[in-house]
Amino acid sequence: MLIKIYGSAIHGVAAQTITIEVNVDTGGVGYHLVGLPDNAIKESSYRISAALKNVGYKIPGKKITINMAPADLRKEGSAYDLSIAIGILAASDQILAEEIQNYIIMGELSLDGSLQPIKGVLPIAIQAREEGFKGIILPIQNAREAAIVSDLDVYGVENIKQVIDFFNEGQPIEKVILDTKKEFHERINDFPFDFSEVKGQETAKRAMEVAAAGGHNIILIGPPGSGKTMLAKRVPSILPPLTLKEALETTKIHSVAGKIGTETSLMTVRPFRAPHHTISDVALVGGGSYPQPGEISLAHNGVLFLDEMPEFKRTVLEVMRQPLEDREVTISRARFTVNYPASFMLVASMNPSPSGFFPDDPNNTSSVYEMQRYMNKLSGPLLDRIDIHIEVQKVEFEQLSEKRKGEQSKDIRERVLKAREIQNERYINLNISSNAQIGPKEIEAFCELDETSFSLIKLAMEKLNLSARAYDRILKVARTIADLEGSEKILSHHISEAIQYRSLDREFWNA
């Protein structure tokens, strides 16, 4: 008897329905699995055999042929165990299969018949709804994630016996129902860190506010222990809240990577990713033999923090240049191409010298050559994509011991939101969401300078030895500072503040 059952495969951050055809006949004995399965799927026969035996069923001693179509698409992982097992039972007449084609069935089997969680549930559920399936049956640990998708019956099961009884005897499985909007709005302000905990560093806090308001990439330069990491971890708390659309996009990527916890369903706060400096190129941007999203895609709609940026390998930093510009990553292989979104805000930190204390190094342990080699680890084209360079000074004892709390993140966030609203109105007819994304054409249209401002930026370019690439960046940052003030025009004090945020372009650092 031939039975068709449906599963799903992940391609990038989207899913593709897989038809699993199971044919059982009496013309011999054997188990044949075709359709480009990987080793995990090939090994499924052992898991399926033990699981069925432990719940009172068995794989029949006949010729079993299983085809996973489309046959030219490689199938990966152990998530097809449940689909294949139910298909074998239905094809061998051990259970009824009248309703089996109305469901996507996925799950990894343990030897006792219980189910283990799988990856990529959200895109699978979205695809199931789009293709008109009645429901989806999957491990209970993944049920809340799938329940985000409306107009789709979601059944979370703990054991294969529940699925067998559901089809064979009509025993009901409780549907998992989730009020997505309610859950989203209840947890939208759940932040573990707050700017009120940061002592001193008012200049750096202001730079962070400007960066958040315009979506600008920022690098913090300062000695060890000055609070660079502490500041960076609090950036998500002042960024605009995720929209429901952004939350779904972000959750899909984390779902594909298997980073969604069983207690959560929808990501409600912007992600914060902080990879170690030993990370490889592939781990950062994504890829591999079986492509997976990298750290920059996991930071989509959030923050990517590179602590001690010069310690990262040069090749790792350079592969970020294209994603920073295009806000997506394209992974190309001989047989396929995968696109991962990567629209993130880059926050980086670095010491001012190998010793960490230049120019206030009491022992003068860094030579000119060492300084140059250290600074040259960051290429000009990469720095060109970082709008704000801010020096973070050592915190004095009086500031550390002060009892008074600093300004709370929610107050800073209100100002950031007002600035973003101005930008949304300004770029309503353009595919731009913040000042950081504008190009030369938009700079010319929206960053017009009066005579005083023009003279100031000209003087700064000449006297401070600012590079040519700094010109556009200064104008973008000045536009954001003006938006924070609610000013329609860019004024001289906006330009003056923006110039202060280009430390690494000055002769002092390049000497």
Image (cartoon, rainbow, N blue to C red):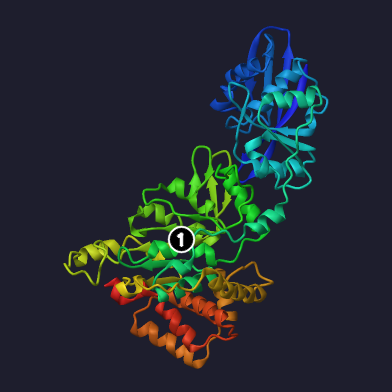
- 97 versus 233 height, above or below: above
Q: Is residue 380 left or right of residue 177?
A: left
Rendered-image quadrant of the N terminus: top right
Picture quarter containing residue 127? top right
In this view, the residue in front, 494 or 110, is 110
Where residue 386 sits in the image (x, y, percent)? 44, 67
Q: Is residue 386 visible?
A: no
The percent position of residue 284, horizontal first and vertical second, equals 46, 50
Give the side of residue 510 with respect to residue 55, left or right. Answer: left
Q: How many marks?
A: 1
Viewer-closest of 382 and 48: 48
Q: Is residue 134 visible?
A: yes
Residue 508 drawn at (x, y percent): 29, 75
Quadrant of the rendered structure where residue 39 is?
A: top right
Q: Quadrant of the C terminus?
A: bottom left
> Residue at image x 59%, y 61%?
189
Question: Viewer-proximal residue, 407 or 146?
Answer: 407
Residue occupied by mark 1: 233
Report crowding for label 1: few under 14, some 14 to 19, many 20 or more residues within 10 A (C-alpha): some
Q: Which corner quadrant of the image does residue 69 belong to?
A: top right
Q: Is residue 176 left or right of residue 309?
A: right
Question: Callout 1, which amino acid?
Answer: Lys
Badge 1 marks a residue whose secondary structure is: helix
Question: What's the residue at 60%, 85% (across, down)?
Answer: 488
User: Which residue, as the protein is rendered here, is positioned at the far bottom?
Assistant: 451
Residue reaching furthest to the front = 403
Instruction: Please determine whether, in this image, residue 79 is positioned above or below residue 13.
Output: above
Rendered location of residue 78, percent (x, y): 59, 29
Q: Looking at the image, which residue sits at the far right?
A: 98
Judge whether 297 appears above or below 236 on screen: above
